[in-house]
Image (cartoon, grey):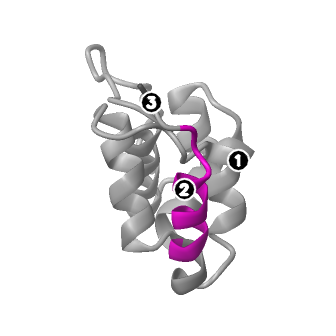
């Protein structure tokens, strides 16, 4: 078993989407939810939710979430919404995303 290591100095996530992808990567490399949570100083439930979103989100959802994190789109992908919508099929997720985008007030 690898020794416990925390987040290396200088490692900075561009946003929650990047953090979620890193959590999924560490999980795929054999790290447990509690170990990831300790390493990034977040709750195990939060980490597990992020991993679930990355595992289940449609490509459209992931692309939109990433664009939002890079400042290329208005924010509609709140973490709690992502966790809920990712229980749906990819087709339904994409429909919900379009509804959520359409319901946003236009920026002037």
Foreground of the two, 51 or 70 = 70
Q: Position of residue 10 (x, y in %)?
A: 26, 15
Give yes or no for contact between labels 1 and 2 (Cβ–Cβ under 8 Å).
Answer: no
Give yes or no for contact between labels 3 and 1 (Cβ–Cβ under 8 Å).
Answer: no
- Mark 1: secondary structure: helix
- Residue 51 seen in this snapshot: yes
| Left or right relative to 75: residue 68 | left
Q: Position of residue 66 (x, y in %)?
A: 34, 47
Which stretch is magenta?
Answer: 94-105
Q: Which mark is residue 80?
A: 1
| Left or right relative to 12: residue 62 | right
The mark lying in front, picked from 3 and 1, is 3
Q: Position of residue 58 (x, y in %)?
A: 45, 73
N-term-proximal mark, 1 vs 2: 1
When asked about the image quadrant of residue 53, the answer is bottom right
Foreground of the two, 20 or 78 = 78
Query: Is residue 84 shown above or below 89?
Result: above
**Residue at 43% from the left image edge and 37% from the top image edge:** 74
Q: Is residue 82 magenta?
A: no
Q: Residues within 10 Å of mark 1 (few under 14, many from 20)?
A: few
Q: Which residue is mark 3?
A: 107
When asked about the image quadrant of residue 96, the answer is bottom right
User: Image quadrant for the C terminus?
Assistant: top left
Q: Is residue 96 magenta?
A: yes
Q: Residues within 10 Å of mark 3 (few under 14, many from 20)?
A: few
**Residue at 57% from the left image edge and 44% from the top image edge:** 104
- Mark 3: secondary structure: loop
Q: Which residue is mark 2?
A: 102
Q: Separation of disc 3 and disc 1 at Cα? A: 23 Å
**Residue at 27% from the left image edge and 38% from the top image edge:** 72
């Amino acid at each position: 078993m690898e020794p416990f290591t925390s987040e290396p100095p200088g490692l900075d996530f561009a946003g929650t989407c990047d953090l979620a992808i890193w959590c999924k990567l560490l999980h795929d490399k054999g790290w447990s939810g509690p170990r990831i949570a300790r390493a990034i100083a977040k709750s195990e439930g939060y980490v597990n939710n992020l991993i679930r979103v990355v595992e289940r989100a449609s490509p459209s959802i992931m692309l939109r979430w990433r664009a939002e994190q890079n400042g290329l789109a208005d924010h509609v992908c709140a973490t709690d919404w992502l966790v809920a919508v990712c229980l749906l099929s990819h087709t339904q997720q994409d429909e919900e995303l379009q509804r959520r985008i359409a319901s946003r007030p236009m920026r002037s």
